[in-house]
Image (spheres, rainbow, N blue to C red):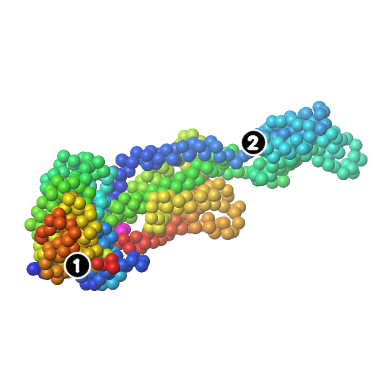
Amino acid sequence: MSEAVAQTFGLTRRFGDKLAVDGLDLAIPKGVVYGLLGPNGSGKTTAMRMLTGLLTPTSGHAEVLGARLPGDAEAVKRRIGYMTQGFTYYRDLTVLENLRFIAEIHDLPARRKRQRIAELMDTYTLHEQANVLAGALSGGQRQRLALAATVMHEPELLFLDEPTAAVDPESRRAFWEQLFDLVDAGTTMIVSTHLMDEAERCHRIAILDRGRKCADGTPRALMDRIAGRAVEVEAKDPRRIGRALSGKEGIVSVAQIGERLRVLVTEGTGDPEALVREALAGHPDAAVRAISPNLEDVFVLATHGRDQ
Amino acid sequence: MISGRRILAILRKELLQLRRDRMTFGMIVMIPLIQLVLFGYAINTEIRHIPAVLVDQSESNLSRSLVQMVEATQVVRFEQHVATVAEAERAIVRAEVRAAFIIPQDVAQRLVRNPAIGSRFADGLQEVEARPIAQWVADGSDTLVAAAIRSLRGMPLGEMFRDSTNTATPTFEVTLFYNPEQRSVVNIVPGLVGIILTMTMIMFTSAAIVRESERGNMEMLITTPIRPVEIMIGKIIPYVGIGLIQVAIILGLGALLFSVTVAGSLWVLLLVTLLFILASLSLGLVLSTLASNQLQAMQMTVFVLMPSILLSGFMFPYEGMPRGAQLIADLLPATHFMRIIRGVVLRDAGLMDLLPDSLWLLGFALLGLGLASLRFRKRLD
């Protein structure tokens, strides 16, 4: 792993009584897509705002591109791009006007500005919408405009806050293609999401829950770590079986996926299949088999038990 | 380092947004236009034709000619005739009339004993105590109406006898400068410049910044290398231009419709108006750093606007206010501008004559800009 472009040390932010981010330690290596996975209210946006210098941490600090935060925020701002959750460019300006405005805000000289805008309109296929008001664009187009504007000044580190939460799956695929093109060009990205399919695309992820980091690593490593703890149950009446299973000794969670039940067991269970079969002794029609865990299972296991 | 390109970017964006906002664009022109025409014609401190009720208890030729004389002054207009004082009072309570004129039965005897008239009859009569010949009862709650009725107190009666016995030689000679015909509109047109600028300048700037935060644009802006002072300057400049357009509309129409022409130098006028616009804009910026949404910004604007209308000297003379109110009025840019603009437009005052108020406006503008830049943080917390 190459050196970290961003690192946090016990980063904490308190809003009144509530700890939005609680002692966060992260290390984001260069040239990767780093995902912050967590439900709404888990502190993803707050963490990003501290990393971009918009919020002052209550305690702890961060180092972003060699600069220390809090303190050196303005130096960082020239080298990062931050695509906020929701569209924060001007809806009453056209695509072209928005891009020109951003280029001028980043102080690009006239020639470079024209060249860069033309490049971005090509890359993000915005030529047809050049003179359309941003407020009249579709969700996918608006997202492309936001990305184009965010990377106008060719930032080394890109922050994307729930970038595709509001776009359809097809646009989401296309959008991630473009993100990987940027990674190929050497950009590092920090992406917050609550969507599993987005998290799966990240090189590395950290799972956040109520301001704390529960787990981090590559999606593959995280899934491997819980190998053997997922069991699938197929039965005629999954709801009744589900009720029979939940709360039983050794069973962490039961989730119905259509006709089937996805069952997760506690760590250190020797034979999960046998455990589930035993629990379902009174239901001979239920078919039980071990399955390989997915990222959602990782997420559920990482965040479970914090309610008690 | 402050970047001209970034300031220009903000400026251009503001103009683009303004051009797309048809309603606001229209208001810039329509507010001064309509208000000037409205106030120019409507506000009149010289009261005429106050509705009144007549109680004529004498019903004589004498009383009828007295009524005609009173009506000839145009101060009152008799709208009702009633028989008793009680009925007259009820008419006042119902606000059908503002005053009652009561002519007693013995009006003839009173008139004869009046020193102004009586002197022409027997000498001995002067020793009898003279009494007023008739009575006015007025709704005194509005001091302007009350003053108009009071002005009738010493009305000359000589005309009744077709001569001018009691048109006395005035004690003082009075010459009225700058507005010899005593038209209210002369004072109102330049004053309106101050009021309309206060309203639009404060409102536009406070709303313009708050709008960015409300729509989330500010979150995007503060992640860029832009400086607070660049945002402020870029946002202010378009409104300086709008302010000047409004001044041109008011003073241009004032000259055209009400023949209130600018007596002083146009350069001085431009300079002091710019000072006032800057002071109002910086006040708007300070308010924008306090308000968290456009409604709050609007309320704060009204909070400043009301005293600016009532205490600045636009409606009532500053000199007539108690000391405490004057101190508050002195805090408002509009008060200082009211003195300056009337000086330039009406009295041909030069910059040196207006120096203290001009310097005050300059100081206010700089203080406001400084305060707004200090309060404006490129952070969300």
Q: Which residues are magenta?
A: B226-230
Q: As displayed, is residue B373 above or below residue B79? A: below
- Residue B176 at x, y = what percent? 60, 43
Q: Dividing the image into 4 quarters, which one contains the N terminus of chain B?
A: bottom left
In this rendering, position of residue B211 left or right of residue A220 = right
- Residue B59 at x, y = what percent? 81, 29
Kind of residue at badge 1: Gly
Q: Chain of mark 1?
A: A
In this rendering, position of residue B134 left or right of residue A191 = right
The residue drawn where x is 20% and y is 53% is: A238
In this rendering, position of residue A40 left or right of residue B325 = left
The residue drawn where x is 13% and y is 44% is: A125
- Neighbor class of circle 1 (other Cα within 10 Å; few <14, some 14-19, many 20+) is some
Q: Indicate the secondary structure of the residue bearing disc 1.
A: loop
In this view, the residue in front, B296 or A190, is A190
Residue B74 part of the magenta segment: no
Q: Which residue is mark 2?
A: B48
Q: Indicate the secondary structure of the residue bearing disc 2.
A: loop
- Residue B27 at x, y = what percent? 40, 40
Kind of residue at badge 2: Arg
For discs 2 and 1, the disc positioned in front in the rendered view: 1
Q: Are marks 2 and 1 in contact (CB under 8 Å)?
A: no
Q: Which residue is mark 1?
A: A250
- Residue B333 at x, y = what percent? 47, 54
- Neighbor class of circle 2 (other Cα within 10 Å; few <14, some 14-19, many 20+) is some
In this rendering, position of residue B102 left or right of residue A86 = right
Callouts 2 and 1 on one subunit: no
Say which quarter of the image contains residue B33.
Answer: top left
Q: Dividing the image into 4 quarters, which one contains the C terminus of chain B?
A: bottom left
